[in-house]
Amino acid sequence: MASGKQESAEERDTRFMRKAFAVAKKALDEGSHPFGAILVGPDDAVLMEQGNAFLPHHDMTGHAERVLMTRASQAYDPEFLKGCTMYTSAEPCAMCAGAAYWAGLGRLVYGLSEARLKTITGNHPENPTLDLSCRIVFASGQREVKVTGPILEDEGAALHEGVWD
């Protein structure tokens, strides 16, 4: 940092979460659902970003986190991904958490919780949200994925205002 002051882990997580929110906002502005994810390497470089990929083909599996983890697993080996963090605008669903686990991700930070997202989306046909914490999915695995979240949850929820009505 320019001031010479060391950035705290919380400040770093906040900075990167807001980048994930910006990716989600861009997806919304482009007519898709407001979800975004970024992959940050061990040196704090943003390696990839991904908005929701529901459109143009109405891909129900085109969640930002799943697509990002597919791309990451094709570009990097699991040993490298173990040192990476994925920041997501909303908590990954079971499918996306599974993709992160299988890719080898070491850490996840999310904004809006899956439980709160469900209260926002209801039973919308384009997002029949599962109220299943990614922590439960990861705890079922054979290796640890560190999870932080929800953080900045109100900011994450604001991205969905009026979208699912």
Image (cartoon, rainbow, N blue to C red):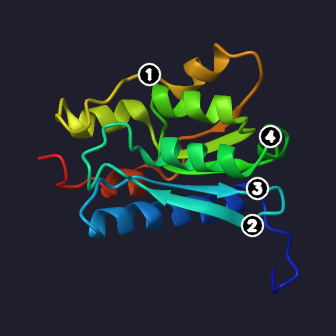
- Residue 9's mark? 3
Helix, strand or loop for disc 2: loop
Residue picked out by circle 4? 82
Is residue 128 placed above or below 67 in the rendered structure?
Answer: above
Q: Do the residues labelled 1 and 2 touch (CB within 8 Å)?
A: no
Gap in Å between the C-alphas at discs 4 and 1? 23 Å
Q: Do the residues labelled 4 and 1 touch (CB within 8 Å)?
A: no
Gap in Å between the C-alphas at discs 3 and 1? 26 Å
Quadrant of the rendering where the N terminus is positioned: bottom right
**Residue 123 spot, x, y in % from top left:** 18, 29
Seen from the viewer's position, the closer of residues 74 and 67 is: 74
Residue picked out by circle 2? 45
Is residue 123 placed above or below 86 in the rendered structure?
Answer: above
How many residues crowd mark 3 within 10 Å: few (<14), some (14–19), many (20+)?
few
Q: Give amino acid for label 3.
A: Ala
Q: Is residue 158 visible?
A: yes
**Residue 117 spot, x, y in % from top left:** 33, 38
Seen from the viewer's position, the closer of residues 106 and 59 is: 59
Q: Is residue 67 left or right of residue 140?
A: left
Q: Are marks 3 and 2 in contact (CB under 8 Å)?
A: no
Residue picked out by circle 1? 132
Q: Give amino acid for label 4.
A: Lys
Mark 2 or mark 3, which is nearer the start of the sequence?
Answer: 3
Q: Give amino acid for label 2.
A: Ala
Q: Is residue 35 left or right of residue 96?
A: left
Mark 1 or mark 4, which is nearer the start of the sequence?
Answer: 4
Of the residues tagged 3 and 1, which is closer to the observer? Answer: 1
